[in-house]
Image: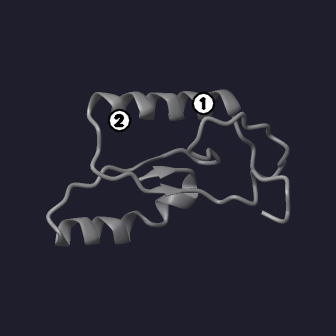
């Protein structure tokens, strides 16, 4: 499970499901960071974001995936803080 703090809200349920099915679950999240190769520009005074730290988080996580590929990746992110087009 990867993504911003929004992804963390799914951790408990995913952990229970993974255990019930005999899988391991790894969770890595970073507040305010969508999981993608994006340039995050902080325009939200109520939700400050460190774009450089987000990029490092994503790149490091992708390196870990390359070194030991997971069977499944679940990505959680809240989109209204990052998308500019209200129609999306």
Residue 20 sits above or below residue 62 on the image: below
Horizontal side, residue 74 vs residue 50: left or right: left
| Quadrant of the frame with the C terminus | bottom right
**What residue is drawn where x is 43% and y is 33%?**
62
Horizontal side, residue 63 vs residue 87: left or right: left
- Where residue 82 appears, as percent x and y from the top left, is 75, 50
Residue 63 occupies quadrant = top left
**What residue is drawn where x is 55% and y is 27%?**
56
**What residue is drawn where x is 21% and y is 55%?**
24
User: Which label was assigned to residue 55?
Assistant: 1
Residue 10 sits above or below residue 64 on the image: below
Q: Nearer the viewer, mark 1 or mark 2?
A: 2
Residues packed near mark 2 inside 10 Å, few (<14), some (14 to 19) or many (20 plus): few
Horizontal side, residue 44 vs residue 16: left or right: right
- Where residue 6 appears, as percent x and y from the top left, is 57, 60
Nearest the eye: 53 or 73: 73
- Where residue 48 appears, as percent x and y from the top left, is 75, 43
Residues packed near mark 1 inside 10 Å, few (<14), some (14 to 19) or many (20 plus): some
Q: What is the C-alpha distance between the residues marked 1 and 2?
A: 15 Å
What element does badge 2 sit on? helix
Residue 70 occupies quadrant = top left
Horizontal side, residue 30 vs residue 18: left or right: right
Name which of mark 1 and mark 2 comes first in the sequence. 1
**What residue is drawn where x is 57% and y is 51%?**
4
Residue hosting label 2: 65
């Amino acid at each position: 499970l990867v993504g911003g703090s929004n992804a963390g809200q799914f951790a408990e349920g995913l952990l229970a499901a993974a255990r019930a099915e005999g899988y391991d679950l790894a969770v890595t999240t970073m507040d305010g960071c969508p999981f993608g190769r994006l340039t995050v520009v902080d325009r939200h005074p109520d939700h400050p974001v460190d774009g450089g730290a987000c990029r490092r988080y994503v790149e490091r996580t992708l390196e870990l995936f390359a070194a030991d590929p997971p069977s499944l990746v679940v990505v959680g992110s809240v989109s209204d803080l990052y998308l500019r087009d209200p129609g999306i």
